[in-house]
Image (spheres, rainbow, N blue to C red):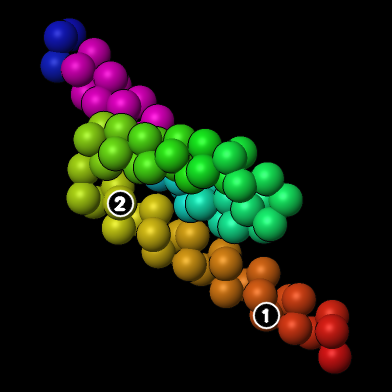
Amino acid sequence: MGRKKSSWISQVKFFIGFLFIILNFILGKIALPVMAIETDLSLFIYAISWVLLVVGVAMCGKEGWYMAKRLYKKHENRIIDSLKRLKS
């Protein structure tokens, strides 16, 4: 019984770490345009994104980092392609 519980906890920990890494990518992109408006707020957002990255990698490890990175790039490219098609 204890083994199932620890497995469940490790899966939840992995998922939360994975979400933190994804949020890091999103906040990092948000910080760039905010910098033109409010530099201090942008630096605060950027600092939070780094904290989320470190905590996320600590929670889910390198495999979570690589999974999140691939997923983010896949969706980022899809969004850029759709915006290019709208412009044409």
The secondary element bearing badge 2 is classed as: helix
Instruction: Measure the alpha-carbon separation of dots 2 and 1.
Output: 24 Å
In the rendered view, would you say 13 is above or below 44? above
In this orientation, does residue 20 appear?
Answer: no
Residue plotted at (79% across, 84% down): 85
Residue plotted at (30% across, 47% down): 64
Q: Of all residues shown, which one is farthest toward the front?
A: 39
In the rendered view, would you say 52 is above or below 84? above
Query: Residue 55 — which label?
Result: none
Q: Residue 18: give x, y in percent of width and height.
A: 38, 41
Q: How many marks?
A: 2
Of 58 and 14, nearer the camera is 58
Residue plotted at (39% across, 53% down): 68
Q: Residue 66: give x, y in percent of width and height.
A: 30, 58
Q: Magenta span covers which residues?
A: 5-18
Q: In which quarter of the image is the N terminus?
A: top left
Q: Of all residues shown, which one is farthest toward the bottom?
A: 88
* Residue type at tag 2: Trp
Question: In the rendered image, which quarter is residue 76 located in?
Answer: bottom right
Q: Is there CB contact under 8 Å for labels 2 and 1?
A: no
* Residue type at tag 1: Asp
Question: In the rendered image, which quarter is residue 4 located in?
Answer: top left
Residue 61 as seen in the image, left or right of residue 37: left
Query: Residue 81 — which label?
Result: 1
* Marks 2 and 1, the one that precedes in the sequence: 2
The residue that label 2 is drawn on is 65
